[in-house]
Amino acid sequence: MRKIIFASHHRLASGMKDTLNYIAPNAANVTAIDAYMTNTPVEKEIDDALKTVDLKNDEVLVFTDMMGGSVNQNFIKYISYPHFHIIAGMSLPLVLTIILALPEGFIDPEQLRNSIEEAKEQVFYVNDKAKDMAIDEDDE
């Protein structure tokens, strides 16, 4: 079994889940954790999300909003499990790159590293990039 979790401060996780479902319906069954939206401690929200997972045999893929943030830190204790992967810096290109290429079996960490590098290529300061592009106003 594979469990995919989007976890963030406030509503980024549920927004990312909603956007993924809009762009790629049925691509993945995702659990969203919007931390600090209720009085429930984030540790409990994580424990609840992982209740149905056998951490020794199942695969868990977690996307968090930022490295070192409290949401990310609360997942760190699980990385000793053999198929538990945490990716910080959740973005739509990153999520799509990884989820649309998920293999039938367990994810190879090298595949994740490659997908992260590929997603990084989607980050631009558009003002500079536009100077390099030939923009034809007649195409609009």
Image (cartoon, grey):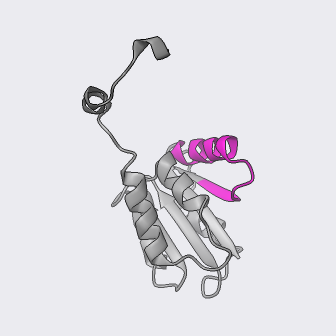
Residue 96 visible (yes or no): yes
Q: Which residue is more in the foreground, 71 or 135?
A: 135
Q: Which residue is at the far right?
A: 26
Going 61% across and 53% down the picture, which residue do you hit? 32
Q: Is residue 24 magenta?
A: yes
| Quadrant where the N terminus is found in the figure | bottom right
What is the x, y in percent for residue 6? 56, 56
What is the x, y in percent for residue 121? 36, 50
Q: Is residue 31 magenta?
A: yes
What is the x, y in percent for residue 107? 56, 76
Q: How many marks?
A: 0
Residue 62 placement, left or right of 113? right
Q: Which residue is at the far top?
A: 138
Q: Which residue is more in the foreground, 27 or 89?
A: 27
Going 57% across and 65% down the picture, which residue do you hit? 46
From the viewer's perspective, is residue 79 above or below residue 133?
A: below
Q: Which residues are magenta?
A: 11-32
From the viewer's perspective, is residue 62 above or below residue 93?
A: below
Q: Which residue is more in the foreground, 134 or 101?
A: 134
Residue 88 visible (yes or no): no
Q: Which residue is more in the foreground, 121 or 12?
A: 121
Residue 45 image-quadrant placement: bottom right
What is the x, y in percent for residue 28? 69, 58
From the viewer's perspective, is residue 59 above or below residue 48?
A: below
Residue 54 image-quadrant placement: bottom right
Going 67% across and 76% down the picture, which residue do you hit? 53
